[in-house]
Image (cartoon, rainbow, N blue to C red):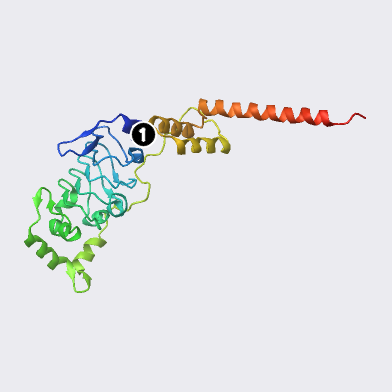
Amino acid sequence: MKLTADLIARAPCYLNALQDRELDLRSYKIPAIENLGVTKDLNDSLDLTDNDIRALANFPVLYRLKTLLLSNNRISKIDPELLSSYLPNLTTLVLTNNAVAELSDLQGLAGAKFLEHLVLLDNPLTKKKYYRLYVIWKLPTVRVLDFTKVARKERQEAKKLFDGKAGPSALAESIAATKSTTSTFEPGEGVPLPLKSSVPTLTMSKEDQDKIRAALAKATTLDEISRLERALKEGKIPSDLKDQQETQSRKKQKLDDGEQEEEEEDTPMA
């Protein structure tokens, strides 16, 4: 099931045990993250557990979001700018039972200023040598990794392994250079292409498209946004806009007819 504006509007939203406003999108078999801009950045926590998401990407900028739950998906790719650009205030990220394969795939979490709790259990990368120490070094703000508190001794050991005299050590550079076969990320990746329909798509003039986009810019409800987006995608101008267009056309025709009559009256007789 696609993550549509309508699905987001119908999903449960409540105060969780921590008194955070949480949007519950569990178990919808969602294949990709999209359309989250319609949430208007009103949630502290987002639960996308038990879906079919493959790329941790396509987020709008969500300053309020602090907790992101993504257990039991198929995530193998992470947007390189995920936390630095789109989720800058995230403190908790749960990625249990996904498909993140290489330590270098965690680059999208680097630069996080507030990430404190991270769970990567049951991902292939947890079997890599130096896994825990590398994550501790790469993400220095993390205090609890896989439900185990990061010890001072671990931080010291991580620095010895991965800090060089003038930057990362050779070992750190070697790990960063190791790319998994699925690690290359392209913007917009993960969003499924629309299925081809046997119903012919109606052609829409640029003028009609502009009118729908103008109406979208003024829309104030999720239902209205969803209706206008669907109309633009299907190539059908909504009935209310069509009626408005016909009314304006009739008014213009009356004005033109009136001007023509005035010109005929003003024309002197031969």
The residue depicted at 49 percent of the width and 38 percent of the height is 213
Q: Residue at x 15, y 51 (%)?
A: 126
Q: Where is residue 90 drawn, in percent x and y?
A: 23, 49
Residue receiving disc 1:
5
In the image, farthest residue toward the right = 270
Q: Quadrant of residue 204?
A: top right
Q: Residue 71 placed where, x, y %?
A: 20, 41
Quarter-wise, where is residue 171 in the image?
bottom left
Provide residue 174's location: percent of width, then percent of height: 22, 64
Q: Nearer the viewer, residue 25 or 267?
A: 267
Front-most of residues 203 and 216? 216
Position above or below: 123 against 214: below
**Relative image position of residue 48 (x, y in whole percent):** 24, 38
Q: Which of 181/208 is in front?
A: 208
Above-or-below relation of 194 to 151: above
- Residue furthest toward the bottom? 165
The residue at 21%/53% (across/down) is 114
Give the class, few, some or many, for how many residues have Cα within 10 Å of label 1's Cα (few <14, many ≥20): many
Q: Quadrant of residue 268?
A: top right
Left or right of residue 203: residue 107: left
- 28 left or right of 201? left
**Amino acid type at mark 1:** Ala
